[in-house]
Image (cartoon, grey):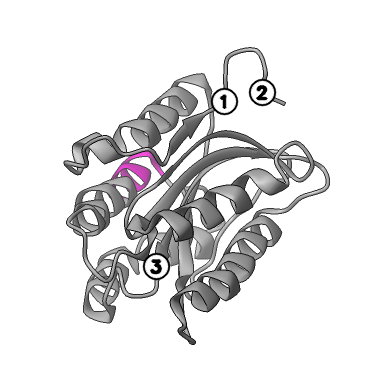
Amino acid sequence: MLVRHRRLPHWELGAASYFVTFRLGDSLPEPVLEGYEFERRDILPTARHQGRKLTGEETRRLDELFSERIERYLDSGVGACRLARPDIAELVANALRYFDGQRYCLHAWCLMPNHVHTVFTILPAGSLDGILHSWKSFTAKQANKLLGAAGTFWQREYYDRLIRDADEYRNFVNYTLENPARAGLKNWKWVWKAEMGVEC
């Protein structure tokens, strides 16, 4: 389980595939984040301190904390939901596609009104931090121009999960593609999957 959240420890592998979620700045209020952090505070640091990988039960619990609480909260449509604006959604979609095949290989993505899910493989020219920084930095500046706003557009933290096998890959791609329907969005166009045989 790989989770980027404030100063918590994490593990990263190069040239690996990831499921990553990043969120708008107003989508997850501080008290919700604090509650999530409190519940998992003993899991990640304890494993790192003991110099071991997470157990299956620990991984399941972290997945549960993320998927059941955070995802449900995000899918309820909290915040201004700036990604529901077609011009901002198009900006973010174009940014995701921009370095596809150079720094990463995109497999699937979904823009929700207040967050983004992506599944991709890091290529030798890329890094997880660099890819996320590039997407978020560029789109934040451009979106704020479109909005006539300043300040925080994306939350600094993001959720990332190393994809360990073909079953997890299929599950995360399906999760990404099905997210709009699960959230009750009708005719939502901001969903994409690489065509079979043309992935990098």
- Could you say where residue 15 lies in the image, as x and y percent from the top left? 73, 39
Whichever of callouts 1 and 3 sits on the residue coming sooner in the sequence is 3
Q: CA distance from mark 1 to mark 3?
A: 25 Å
| Crowdedness near tag 2: few (<14), some (14–19) or many (≥20) residues, C-alpha within 10 Å | few
Q: Is 120 or 98 nearer to us in this picture?
A: 98
Q: Is 118 or 141 nearer to us in this picture?
A: 141
Q: Which residues are magenta?
A: 55-61
Q: Main secondary structure of the magenta part?
A: helix
Secondary structure at badge 2 equals loop
Q: Using the image, determine if residue 86 lies above or below residue 153.
A: above
Question: Position of 9 compared to 40: left or right?
Answer: right
Residue to which mark 1 is pinned: 194
Furthest-top residue in this view: 197
Q: CA distance from mark 2 to mark 1?
A: 6 Å
Residue to which mark 2 is pinned: 199
Residue at the spot x=46%, y=60% of the render? 88
Residue at the spot x=75%, y=36% of the render? 101
The type of residue carrying mark 3 is: Leu
Secondary structure at badge 1 equals loop
Asked if residue 18 lies in the magenta stretch, the reply is no
Q: Which mark is residue 24?
A: 3
Q: CA distance from mark 3 to mark 2?
A: 28 Å
